[in-house]
Image: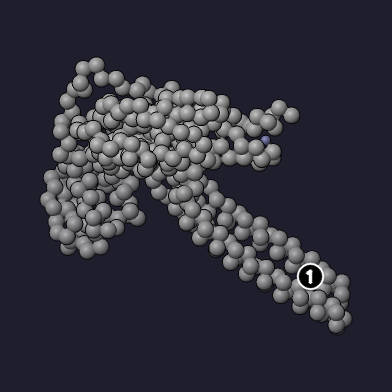
């Protein structure tokens, strides 16, 4: 753990324990001493007085609290279901951007259509931040967090801004929540099915990005083991063949040996397949709903004879425009294709050629199958 994350972890533990009635005394370096009330001693399975250290250097007589220690689970038991949902209003100033056209050029590239910025107005929105924990298990195990942010007004993915938004929501110096200006229009909650579809489409690419290094490491280890097993049995076979060839031996017995070696080889390969079979599970850990002022960019998208209005929000917390929405996979980059039928904005993958007829089609319009192939 870095010094920075160690002291963040220490601060978290200190405020959690203090909230539960413990008396806390900071200890150098990056540690704390806590006097626990009786209920807390029971929940944490700890004595009345505990000394905890969070960095590599421990205070004298302190227990180490690291990601590997069981203290993580003990704090988890203490938290229970609390801390899984947070709603906050970010009272930040959202100034009018001085050069909106320029901002837009950096935030949106349309591959096959043009757009016109019609207006920029101050507005409010709600950002839903879902934090998922994935666990990938093969011969080794990896876990990690995948944040997915969604602007409920525009449908844009907010992944690049999630961390800053969450920091802003948790900032202790944040002004106490006041009331929203009267008459403030906020986007409604998404229906459960729409949200579920969004998450189902958004997660696979995000999980792939996170497990990419783990997967390539695993692939290397699998190939190494396969070639080791292969070399070993190739050696055995060659020896048996040579003996057969020289006819110094009982040929029926050598054939049996050869068969047995072949079977053993297949079994070893099957074992390896099982050892390296990858299982990934993803669980929702935390949900945050952040209400924030924005500057709303209204665009007119033009493709052939069609026109469609879309909005993109400029977020004052990051002083950036959000990525354009992708009606298919909620990707968070800047390149979009506009479909002919509904003028959906989709990422190029969402308008990729059909694998059998090679014709491009919009996955947001036709989520199940290519319309051309479906017609035949
Ligand atoms: Zn097709
Ligand atoms: Zn479409």
At numbered mark 1, what does the secondary structure look like: helix, strand or loop?
Answer: helix
Residue found at x 74% / y 62%: 263
Rendering quarter of residue 252: bottom right
Q: Residue 209: percent from the left, percent from the top? A: 46, 49
Left or right: 264 as drawn, with respect to 57:
right
Q: Residue 126: percent from the left, percent from the top? A: 32, 28
Q: Residue 102: percent from the left, percent from the top? A: 33, 40
Rendering quarter of residue 260: bottom right
Quadrant containing ligand 1 reads: top right
Residue found at x 62% / y 40%: 353
Rendering quarter of residue 21: top left
Of residues 93 and 120, the one drawn nearer to the viewer in this rendering: 120
Residue found at x 14% / y 59%: 28
Of residues 348 and 6, the one drawn nearer to the viewer in this rendering: 348
Residue found at x 79% / y 69%: 258
Left or right: 243 as drawn, with respect to 103:
right
Q: Residue 339: percent from the left, percent from the top? A: 54, 31
Q: Which residue in the protein does label 1 denote?
A: 257
Q: How is the image coloured?
A: one colour
Callout 1: 10 Å neighbours few (<14), some, many (20+)? some
């Amino acid at each position: 753990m870095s010094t920075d994350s160690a002291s963040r972890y220490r601060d978290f533990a200190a405020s959690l324990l203090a909230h539960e009635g413990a008396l806390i005394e900071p200890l150098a370096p990056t540690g704390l001493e806590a006097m626990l009330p009786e209920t807390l001693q029971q929940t944490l399975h700890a004595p009345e007085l505990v000394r905890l250290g969070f960095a590599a250097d421990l205070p004298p007589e302190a227990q180490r609290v690291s990601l590997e220690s069981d203290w993580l689970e003990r704090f988890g038991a203490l938290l229970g279901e609390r801390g899984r949902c947070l709603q906050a209003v970010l009272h930040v100033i959202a100034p009018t951007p001085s050069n909106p056209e320029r901002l837009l050029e950096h935030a949106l590239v349309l591959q096959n259509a043009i757009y016109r910025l019609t207006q920029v107005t101050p507005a409010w929105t709600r950002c839903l931040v879902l934090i998922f924990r994935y666990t990938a298990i093969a011969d080794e195990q990896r876990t990690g967090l995948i944040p997915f942010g969604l602007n409920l007004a525009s449908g844009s993915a907010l992944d690049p801004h999630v961390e800053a938004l969450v920091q802003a929501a948790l900032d202790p110096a944040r002004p106490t929540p006041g009331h929203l200006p009267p008459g403030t229009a906020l986007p409604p909650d998404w229906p459960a099915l729409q949200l579920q579809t969004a998450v189902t489409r958004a997660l696979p690419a995000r999980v792939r990005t996170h497990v990419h290094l783990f997967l390539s490491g695993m692939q290397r280890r699998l190939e190494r083991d396969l070639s080791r097993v292969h070399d070993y049995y190739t050696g055995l076979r060659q020896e048996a063949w040579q003996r057969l060839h020289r006819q110094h031996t009982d040929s029926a017995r050598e054939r049996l040996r050869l068969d047995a070696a072949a079977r053993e080889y297949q079994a070893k390969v099957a074992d390896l397949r099982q050892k390296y079979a990858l299982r990934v599970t993803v669980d929702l850990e935390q949900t945050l709903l952040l209400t924030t002022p924005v500057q709303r960019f209204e665009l007119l998208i033009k493709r052939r004879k069609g026109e469609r209005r879309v909005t993109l929000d400029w977020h004052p917390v990051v002083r950036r425009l959000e990525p354009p929405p992708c009606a298919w996979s909620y990707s968070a980059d800047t390149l979009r294709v506009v479909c002919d039928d509904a003028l959906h904005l989709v990422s190029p993958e969402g308008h990729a050629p059909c694998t059998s007829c090679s014709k491009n089609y919009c996955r947001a319009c036709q989520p199940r199958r290519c319309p051309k192939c479906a017609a035949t």
